[in-house]
Amino acid sequence: MSRSSKSILVHSRRRKAVTLIEVVASIALVGTLFTVVLIGNSRHLRQLKAAGVKHQACEKLDRLLSRWSVDELDPRRFSELAEIEGFTIGERKADSAWSIKTEKKPLTDIQTGSLWSIQAFHRAPNGKRTLAATVEVVVTDRSGVAQQ
């Protein structure tokens, strides 16, 4: 066997092994990909939780408005019906998970009603209160006098 054929065999044996630089580079690449996946997953979970809270708020407001419409949108019954649905009015109970805020505005084009803006808030376990849903309802007065 000649010297050149021995060097080819030695060279081919060395190329079968992975160098330390290649190992470190592949570990860095896998680590980067893993980090990207974790960050994307945490964002996805946060968005999923927020969507669930908004969906729950919409369902609660829908049930509240259904009950209220059966009572012909009587403003005197609103607070009672809101409490039946598990809402507190304003921030009276700090431990309540759900609260609503109402704002009544007189209608300019209809003299016998008002526009109710109803906002549903959710209080997270950490105490942070966030707006989950909003609905606006036109409430007319049967006697012809605007509700204020």
Image: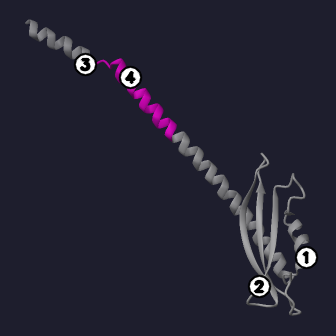
Q: Which residue is mark 2?
A: 107
Frontmost of labels 4 and 1 is 1
Asked if the residues shown at circle 3 and circle 1 are in contact, with their CB atoms under 8 angstroms apart, the answer is: no
Amino acid at pointer 1: Arg
Asked if the residues shown at circle 3 and circle 4 are in contact, with their CB atoms under 8 angstroms apart, the answer is: no
Amino acid at pointer 2: Leu
Q: Quadrant of residue 97?
A: bottom right
* Residue interval drawn in magenta: 15-36
Q: Earlier in the sequence, mark 1 or mark 2?
A: 1
Q: Which residue is mark 3?
A: 15
Q: Position of residue 90 (x, y in %)?
A: 85, 62
Q: Name the quadrant of the C terminus.
A: bottom right
Q: Earlier in the sequence, mark 4 or mark 1?
A: 4
Residue 1 in sight in this render:
no
Q: Which residue is mark 4?
A: 23
Q: Which residue is mark 1?
A: 77
Amino acid at pointer 4: Val
